[in-house]
Image (cartoon, helix red, strand yellow):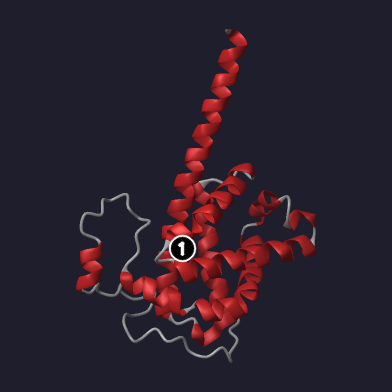
Amino acid sequence: MGECTGHGDLDVGSRGVGRSGPRRMEDQSDRNSREGQGPGRKDVVKPSTIEIVKATAPVLKEHGQEITQRMYEIAFEARPDLRPFFGKTWMQGPEEGRKQAARLAGSVYAYALHIDELEKLSKAIDHIAQVHVEAKIIPEMYPPIGECLLAAMKDVLGDAATPEVLDAWEEAYGALAEICIDREREIYREQERALFEVERSRVA
């Protein structure tokens, strides 16, 4: 993957090591944040991750659409089987695809801004979950898309996408994926209950 320069360094401090090395040690505040966190609470991120992700917001505001456009290019090249799930966007043509990339860029930027106050994103998350259910998105699709997003960040931001930044976004993406997956499961269950009620009324 190519790297581009000129995006500058992100002010995220000097904690941690690269993605290919051991995970950085949590500080005391990180450990405290995880007290009482059950094994299923993958949607909770460390304070240090929140700090780094919020620091990337200005860069994402400027380069977000370029990143998401590149993400889709990588995804469709590596996994052409994913393209049919974008029947109302990428399958309609390049222009609709660019609009989808712009919408996703806005969502990524909003998440970076409000990762520590997700209640402000509840309506957006619910809308995304509804769209995903309509498109028959399943949980197994989230990891490859996440990998493509990180690869796109590296391609577009070059040296500014430090191992520490990519580490933080890997955790942040995983947390958001868990939230979306949980909501999508709720919607699927609601649909199943509604269908059951319709079928029951027919035989009553």
Q: Which residue is identified by label 1?
A: 173
Query: Which quarter of the rendering shows the C terminus?
Result: top right
User: Which of the 4 image quarters holds residue 29?
Assistant: bottom left
Q: Secondary structure at mark 1?
A: helix
User: Which of the 4 image quarters holds residue 47?
Assistant: bottom left
Q: Amino acid at mark 1?
A: Tyr
Q: Residue 7: x, y in percent?
A: 56, 88
Q: Residue 147: x, y in percent?
A: 51, 65
Q: Nearer the viewer, residue 170 or 63?
A: 63
Q: Does residue 175 appear in the picture of this structure?
A: yes
Q: Nearer the viewer, residue 163 or 58?
A: 58
- Note whether 166 is above or below 80 in the view shown: below
- Label 1 packing within 10 angstroms: few (<14), some (14-19), many (20+): many
Q: Residue furthest front?
A: 120
Q: Is residue 11 left or right of residue 33?
A: right
Q: Residue furthest top?
A: 204
Q: Residue 14: x, y in percent?
A: 33, 86
Q: Does residue 1 appear in the picture of this structure?
A: no
**At x 58% / y 25%, what residue is drawn?**
195
**At x 33% / y 74%, what residue is drawn?**
48
- Note whether 83 is above or below 153 in the view shown: above
**At x 69% / y 61%, what residue is drawn?**
100
Q: Is residue 191 left or right of residue 39?
A: right
